[in-house]
Image (spheres, grey):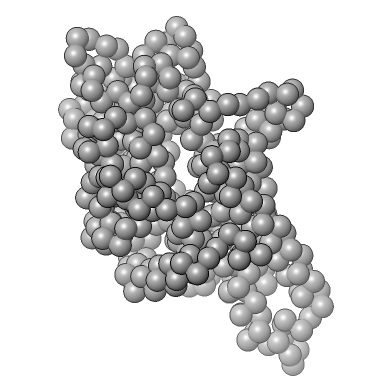
Amino acid sequence: MESIYFNEEHHLFRESLRGFLKKEVVPHIEKWEKTGTIERFIWEKFGEMGYFGLAYPEEYGGMDLDLFYTVILLEELQRINSGGFAAAIWAHAYLAMTHINKEGNHDIKERYLAPSITGEKIGCLCITEPFGGSDVAGMRTTAVKKGDKYIINGSKTFITNGVYSDYLVVAAKTTPELGNKGISIFVIDRDMPGVSATKLDKLGWRASDTGEIAFDNVEVPVENLMGEENMGFPYIMQHFALERLIMGINAHARSEFAIEYTLQYMSEREAFGRTIDRFQALRHTMSDLATEVEICKTFNYTVAYRLNNKEYVVKEASMSKLQSTKVADNVIYQCLQMLGGYGYIEEYPLARLLRDSRLGPIGGGTSEILREIIAKMIIDGKDYKPVT
């Protein structure tokens, strides 16, 4: 099945990436998980290898490759068992940088996209607010135009790379009375006066910095507006498809890693005179789990193929995240059970996997929100269309 989507160049890229991660990243993961700080040198190494530029134009230092190189990057990041590290990388490369690339003009791309591709600058995407959660249209952050500047006030929360990034892609209401039709997108430098961040202590994703960010009369030049004023909501909605597919792919990849590790453990662990992979009840449980994951992966690859062909896959991407994250939580829960008491010990990978996986049904649109989006499309006949 993989040959439908992956050619020889893809396979060579996967082998090279896997070797890079093993050599350059894995030796540091335990430290980053403990400190909650990913050292800057690794961002520069990712940039040197071109990993941040896979999907971006050659004009700004990217490679303009098909989406399945991104699929491989996402899958291999899940195999090193640090959801936080993986999230920091893809939140920079596919949340912040996506908006810079799609809505930014040439000047903004020169100032932010090019150094993001090299790993010189790290970005974050600031949409979610303390009082809004999944209700993007209910955001309270405002951007009031005064002369050649916008004055931004408000706060954001649960922002990956929210503390240590160099720039922020921020959604704010430029015309509050218009509701979701009055939102705009800005790029803001971290060192602008009035920007502050507080690091949040999380259940999982420990290696990544997740922040609550405050904007206190931040003066942003008008040239830092991205795209058209008051078009921010459609921009955000359009890019949610990619974010949700990414989280679906992450989910099937960490499920595969959990199953692979657990089967290896079961082949070595003995009870009652035989290895536990010989017990029918356990064998059948693993068979069910592997089947569910394979179905998710096959579907996710199909959605990625359609997105790569410029189709607007809002419904399918929502389904991908909804089902794949649900399956991942169950798979990892069941795999941990196969390890017995050892599954509950931090020295073994399933404990961290379980904590990291639980963010799946929450971040990037909760499962409850996704069900309603899908319901609007399949029951109410809602038809979402791209704006760019």
Residue 185: which quarter of the image? top left
Asked if residue 326 lies left or right of residue 344, the reply is right
Asked if residue 73 lies left or right of residue 111, the reply is right
> Is 221 above or below relative to 299?
above
The residue sitting at 30% across, 19% down in the picture is 153
Label tally: 0
Considering every residue shown, the one lying at the far top of the view is: 177
The answer to whether one can see residue 129 in this image is yes
**Residue 373 x, y percent position in the rendering:** 65, 30
Residue 73: which quarter of the image? bottom left
Q: Nearer the viewer, residue 8 or 211?
A: 8
Asked if residue 179 lies left or right of residue 169, the reply is right
The residue sitting at 67% across, 48% down in the picture is 323
The answer to whether one can see residue 325 in this image is no
**Residue 228 x, y percent position in the rendering:** 37, 19
Q: Nearer the viewer, residue 65 or 108?
A: 65
Asked if residue 362 lies left or right of residue 337, the reply is left
Rendered-image quadrant of the N terminus? bottom right
**Residue 83 x, y percent position in the rendering:** 46, 56
**Residue 292 x, y percent position in the rendering:** 72, 59
The residue sitting at 64% across, 51% down in the picture is 302
The residue sitting at 18% across, 30% down in the picture is 192
Considering every residue shown, the one lying at the far right of the view is: 280
Q: Nearer the viewer, residue 206 or 72?
A: 72
Q: Nearer the viewer, residue 182 or 281?
A: 182
